[in-house]
């Protein structure tokens, strides 16, 4: 993207008028699974929009989760939310532990008296995928690894929703966001392994079901997905940083369509501030690219990537095109 295009993109991206109240001022959010990646960015962007954001995860400054990364902590996420203009409150929580989740929800109720936005971005199973899962039939996959994937990607979501929804429905406009990998349309293809396929399709059905249940409370649920996410963990996998991520393209051309975690996060923050959001999105699954088109959002570099469309049309269907055509 040239300098003029980047300038035009920045001008098109909505900016916060300091004379106006932030769109989510007074709102209380919980981002479950906010240690890194999309979860961290979602928390920061909700905070930037004025929300008080409770951020949870298993990696703290004293203890690492099974993911094994110590460079990002939940305390740091809370500090980033506050630095962005919101109020970040870090609560170390294992969302597979019902007592810990009950304690978390009780604290939010005690301190805020309400919960308006619940974001389920729980995962942390990347370390189980390469070697153990991808490229293997379900019966070749170590059962313990497969079941752990379902715990991390499904059971944690169900526990969190079940225990937080009684507080969420007290809001005048409850919003439940399920973060997953792929939309219902994109995931009509098998996601390489039975356990992973189940883990990434379950949140889509959770959003569909909860969308029906939240209607009578004036609320909604939606499943969202990033495209090719340039998370901290993905950058580390390729041995690059956010500053030189394009160096990977020579050996992994599809990475040219990659997006920063803040792309999806900006789009979700815009959705959360949309008074017509329920009529547009309730019960549906959508992507960062689709939301960005609707809300005029751009990524940190001023581009508007649509990775799902690129993979669908070019990589899977053979349409002539390059990643640049979808940015």
Image: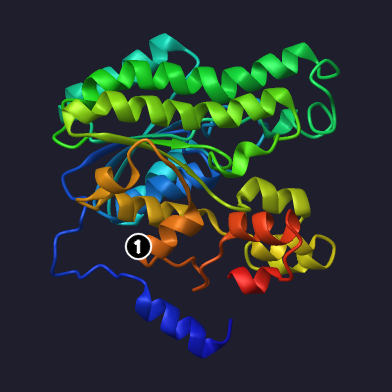
Res 175 visible: no
Q: Quadrant of residue 14?
A: bottom left
Side of 149 relative to 296 (left or right): right
Residue at the spot x=42%, y=11% of the render? 98
Residue at the spot x=36%, y=77% of the render? 12
**Count of numbered marks:** 1
Between residues 68 and 260, which one lies in front from this camera angle? 260
In the rendered image, residue 112, in percent from the top left (x then y), is placed at 17, 30
Side of 124 relative to 18 (left or right): right
The colour scheme of the drawn protein is rainbow
Q: Which residue is mark 1?
A: 295
Secondary structure at badge 1 equals helix
In the rendered image, residue 170, in percent from the top left (x then y), is placed at 16, 26
In the rendered image, residue 292, in percent from the top left (x then y), is placed at 43, 61
Above or below residue 262? Residue 3 is: below
Side of 234 relative to 91 (left or right): right
Res 246 visible: yes
In the rendered image, residue 81, in percent from the top left (x then y), is placed at 36, 49
Residue at the spot x=85%, y=27% of the render? 136
Name the quadrant of the C terminus: bottom right
Name the quadrant of the N terminus: bottom right
């Amino acid at each position: 993207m040239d300098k003029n295009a980047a300038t035009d993109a920045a001008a098109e991206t909505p900016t916060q008028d300091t004379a106006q109240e932030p769109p989510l001022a007074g709102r209380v959010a919980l981002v479950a699974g906010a240690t890194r990646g999309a979860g961290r960015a979602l928390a920061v962007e909700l905070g930037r929009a004025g929300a008080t954001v409770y951020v949870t995860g298993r990696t703290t400054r004293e203890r690492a989760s099974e993911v094994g990364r110590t460079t990002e902590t939940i305390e740091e996420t809370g500090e980033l939310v506050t630095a962005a203009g919101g109020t970040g409150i870090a609560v170390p929580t294992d969302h597979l532990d019902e007592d810990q989740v009950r304690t978390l929800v009780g604290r939010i109720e005690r301190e805020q008296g309400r919960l308006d936005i619940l974001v389920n971005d729980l995962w942390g199973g990347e370390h189980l995928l390469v070697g153990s899962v991808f490229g293997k039939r379900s019966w070749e996959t170590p059962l313990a690894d497969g079941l752990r994937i379902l715990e991390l990607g499904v059971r944690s979501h169900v526990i969190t929703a079940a225990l937080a929804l009684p507080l969420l429905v007290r809001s005048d406009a409850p919003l439940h966001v399920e973060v997953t990998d792929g939309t219902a349309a994109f995931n009509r293809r098998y996601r390489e392994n039975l356990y992973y396929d189940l883990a990434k399709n379950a949140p889509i059905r959770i959003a569909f079901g909860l969308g029906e249940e939240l209607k009578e409370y004036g609320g909604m649920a939606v499943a969202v997905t990033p495209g090719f996410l340039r998370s901290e963990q993905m950058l580390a996998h390729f041995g690059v940083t956010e500053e030189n991520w394009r160096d990977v393209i020579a050996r992994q051309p599809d990475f040219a369509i990659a997006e920063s975690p803040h792309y999806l996060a900006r789009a979700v923050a815009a959705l959360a501030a949309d008074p017509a959001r329920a009529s547009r999105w309730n019960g549906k699954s959508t992507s960062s690219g689709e939301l960005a088109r609707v809300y005029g959002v751009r990524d940190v570099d001023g581009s508007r990537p649509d990775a799902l469309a690129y993979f669908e049309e070019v990589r899977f269907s053979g349409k002539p095109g390059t990643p640049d055509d979808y940015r």
